[in-house]
Amino acid sequence: MPTHRRARSQEAKQQRAEDLLDAARRLAAETGGVRYLTLAAVTETAGLHPSAIRRYFDSKEELLLELAEREWVDWREEVLRRAKAATRLGPEETAEVLAGGLLARPLLCDLFTHIPLSLEGEVPLERARRYKELSVTSVAAMSAALADAGTMTAPQVADLIAATAAQTAHAWQIAHPTATLATLYEQHPEWAHTVYGMTERVTRLLKATARGLAAESRD
């Protein structure tokens, strides 16, 4: 069992917060998603007393929203790097940049389901404002960069980003069924077709979406 530690300095407190975030990230990967996370499990994995988490995060929702922010930044920065190195990205290539970057971050795919359902609405106003500002400015930066590097307009790319988040969130949940659904799929394998091939299916759907968005301007 981990030894519970109490932070004394500001630097130590920051490290404890990082330990909690790392613990939540590991547990989400090991247990099948953030829906199974509990604060007790997170604090125990981080080696902290269960009551200590309130010194760092007001709630599980705030902790998960912090993870979402960090994942957003990572996705945004990868997209910006790839856009900077690209020239004349077509609609399908633009979709590949967005989908590939997001699908490589399964935690963000998972969190995109929970952000609008519970996370944003269950934290203090200023915390929600901070997250919303980051997500909105990230979409704007990604849209502008991909528009400069390709043939889609910035508004079209913004719509494609929204579709990417929605498609990956939906597909991730289906690809990680609950115990009940997993048993059901064992009994009826023909119903489990949507569980498999998540990356290929999402990428294919987003390429089609990108082509449709680009075609609107031509029409």
Image (cartoon, rainbow, N blue to C red):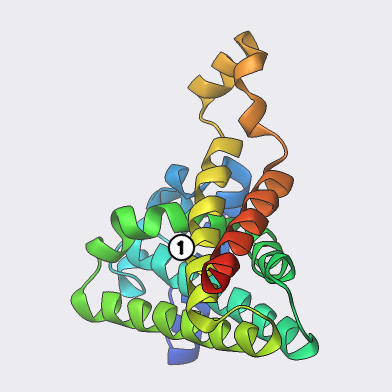
Which type of secondary structure does the marked residue at label 1 adopt? loop
The image quadrant of residue 192 is: top right
- Seen from the viewer's position, the closer of residues 36 and 132 is 132
- Seen from the viewer's position, the closer of residues 125 and 25 is 125
Q: Is residue 195 above or below residue 105?
A: above
Residue at 55% x, 15% y is 184
Residue at 76% x, 83% y is 88
Q: As drawn, is 123 to the left or to the right of 81?
A: left
The image quadrant of residue 201 is: top right
Q: As drawn, is 200 to the left or to the right of 54?
A: right
Count of numbered labels shown in the rendering: 1
Relative image position of residue 65 (x, y in whole percent):
40, 67
Which residue appears farthest toward the left when viewing the image? 125
The image quadrant of residue 211 is: bottom right
Residue 3 seen anywhere in this rendered image of the structure: no
Residue at 59% x, 79% y is 76
Q: Is residue 202 above or below residue 61?
A: above
Residue 74 seen anywhere in this rendered image of the structure: yes
Q: Is residue 48 above or below residue 81?
A: above
Relative image position of residue 203 (x, y in whole percent):
69, 54
Provide the residue designation for mark 1. Answer: 48
Task: Say which amino acid is labelled 1.
Answer: Leu
